[in-house]
Image: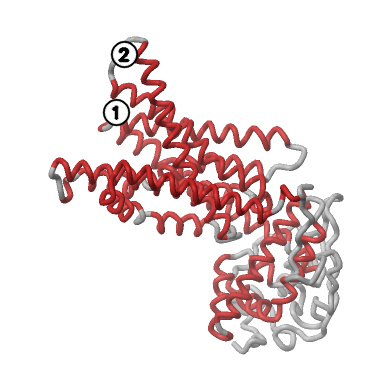
């Protein structure tokens, strides 16, 4: 395999490998030494305290405006679209799922801190704008409020939401590998923001209906719920996703591209503000302007963002197939694993097979094996780009250790799941002679010569993976006809 000169070599696999770069036996987790002000527990405690105080303040402010009954009605209606939005972003993030603690922080920041900042700053800025315009001769309060919603709110709200993305980018840099990562964090943050904002809007609408005697489908509450929760629940996530794309692209930049790492997030934040301002401006005018912006701008942008996210996710799968063969060649992985791990369908088959044959614990082990292997591929890509950092060796050995612990369960089911993946039509760029055969896809034997899994096992043993060397090239499976059952007893 041809590697970049700056890319560290892959350590060879031995029957009982040693992981000397990983310090201590404590769960084999690499934890570098940190200064007191860089302590994770201290940072986490400060953030939890900040979010808790923000949540209490925003709760009191919203309840003050809507009353207890209005708050409860708004809360009950605002929570309905949240599971669907979170599930949608988790679906986008299937290749390398973000840790739940990151997503919980993003949602809490959007629902508490960002909303509190927006509520206070929007009020102060709008009041200042109203006084300024009034002093200049205008007495139209509705026009002043429209100017505030169009020009003040987008700047304040998008900046407040972007703070969560910036914090995760700075302190969880390892979790930013591309566009998908930025979009998911931004979308979860904006979902939390929209949740609290919907409580306020729906609660106020309910209070108005109580005062005016409206009820049923023609009430202000029903109209507000339809517009905000059914017609446009993706509005805030779409705005903030622009910022997320900028941070995702910055995360994929190399160390030499410093201007790109700074300018892309700033430009993306400005784009989010402009898009948010156009949306708010159309909403203040209402009627045809709102429907025109919704149909001609918001819906196409939402479709474009969905396509971009899926395209980026497919690139992540190609990254796995490109960089994991280096570990396969060194004996850490079996030949089918890069293929199976680069297919979401094969991953699901492997987990289901482990659950049926060995129970939930085995399925969890396969899911963990998949996650560690994916992280290993992205770590190798960062090394290829020169952005892996000085702790690359320790991090690599940590991931290899976790793979080694779970390989007895995961490797057989992944080998079986690889049969569901069609064989590539063209050779991969792994050099003229791959690993165990004279040609990558030459002759009747696909991928690895006449006996892909027979003979000496890549991890140093002598036992093949499916008994004797399976027949190759005579059936409809990408790796030959159906082989012998794997070791787990399929």
Q: Residue furthest left?
A: 213
Task: Identify which residue, 52 or 412, lies in the foreground.
Answer: 52
Q: Which residue is mark 2?
A: 138
Relative vertical location of residue 444 with respect to residue 234 in this rendering, above or below: below
Give residue 324's mark. Answer: none
Residue denoted by label 1: 285
Visual colour scheme = secondary structure
Q: Residue at x 57, y 58 (%)?
A: 101
Lateral position of residue 184 relative to residue 400, left or right: left
Whether residue 177 is situated above or below residue 476 in the rendered picture: above
Question: SS for tag 1?
Answer: helix
Look at the image and tell me whether residue 489 can be seen: yes
Count neighbours of disc 1 (C-alpha within 10 A) and say few if under 14, some if 14 to 19, many if 20 or more. Answer: few
Question: Residue 130: where, in percent of width, then height?
Answer: 36, 20
Q: Quadrant of residue 245?
A: top right
Q: Quadrant of residue 29?
A: bottom right
SS state under label 2: loop
Q: Position of residue 124 (x, y in %)?
A: 42, 28
The quarter of the picture where the C terminus appears is bottom right
User: Rounded to the nearest whole Å, what is the CA distance between mark 1 and mark 2?
Assistant: 19 Å
Residue 437 shows in this picture: no
- Give x and y (percent) for residue 52: 50, 51
- Going 40% across and 39% down the picture, which residue do you hit? 298
């Amino acid at each position: 395999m041809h590697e970049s000169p700056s890319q560290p070599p892959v350590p060879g696999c031995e029957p009982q490998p040693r992981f000397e770069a990983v310090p201590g036996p404590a769960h084999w987790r690499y934890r570098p030494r940190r200064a007191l002000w860089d302590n994770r527990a201290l940072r986490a405690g400060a953030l939890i305290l900040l979010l808790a105080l923000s949540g209490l303040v925003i709760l009191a402010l919203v309840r003050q405006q809507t009353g207890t009954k209005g708050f409860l009605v708004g809360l009950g209606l605002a929570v309905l679209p949240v599971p669907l939005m979170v599930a949608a972003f988790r679906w986008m993030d299937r290749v390398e799922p973000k840790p739940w603690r990151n997503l919980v922080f993003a949602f809490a920041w959007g629902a508490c801190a960002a909303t509190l900042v927006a509520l206070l700053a929007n009020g102060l800025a709008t009041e200042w704008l109203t006084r300024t315009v009034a002093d200049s001769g205008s007495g139209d309060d509705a026009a002043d409020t429209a100017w505030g919603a169009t020009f003040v709110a987008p700047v304040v709200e998008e900046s407040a939401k972007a703070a969560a993305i910036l914090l995760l980018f700075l302190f969880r840099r390892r979790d930013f590998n591309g566009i998908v990562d930025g979009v998911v964090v931004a979308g979860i943050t904006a979902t939390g923001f929209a949740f609290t904002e919907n409580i306020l809007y729906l609660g106020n609408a309910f209070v108005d209906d109580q005062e005016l005697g409206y009820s049923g489908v023609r009430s202000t509450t029903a109209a507000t719920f339809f517009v905000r929760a059914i017609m446009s629940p993706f509005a805030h996530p779409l705005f903030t996703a622009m910022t997320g794309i900028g941070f995702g692209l910055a995360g994929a930049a190399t160390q030499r591209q410093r201007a790109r790492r700074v300018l892309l997030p700033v430009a993306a934040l400005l784009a989010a503000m402009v898009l948010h301002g156009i949306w708010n401006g159309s909403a203040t005018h209402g009627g045809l302007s709102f429907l025109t912006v919704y149909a001609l701008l918001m819906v196409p942008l939402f479709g474009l963002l969905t396509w971009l996210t899926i395209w980026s996710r497919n690139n992540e799968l190609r990254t796995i197939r490109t960089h994991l063969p280096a570990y396969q060649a060194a004996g850490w992985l079996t030949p089918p694993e890069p293929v199976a791990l680069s297919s979401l369908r094969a991953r699901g088959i492997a987990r289901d097979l482990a659950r049926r044959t060995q129970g939930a614990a085995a399925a969890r082990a396969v899911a963990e094996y998949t996650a560690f292997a994916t992280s290993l591929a992205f770590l190798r890509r960062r090394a290829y780009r020169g952005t892996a950092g000085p702790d690359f060796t320790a991090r690599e050995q940590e991931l290899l250790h976790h793979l080694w612990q779970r390989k007895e369960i995961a490797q057989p089911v992944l080998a079986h799941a690889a049969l569901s993946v069609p064989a590539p039509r063209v050779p991969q760029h792994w050099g003229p002679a791959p690993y165990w055969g004279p040609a990558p896809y030459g002759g009747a034997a696909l991928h690895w010569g006449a006996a892909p899994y027979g003979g000496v096992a890549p991890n140093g043993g002598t036992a093949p993976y499916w008994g004797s060397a399976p027949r190759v090239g005579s059936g409809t499976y990408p790796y030959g006809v159906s082989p012998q059952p794997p070791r787990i007893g399929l």
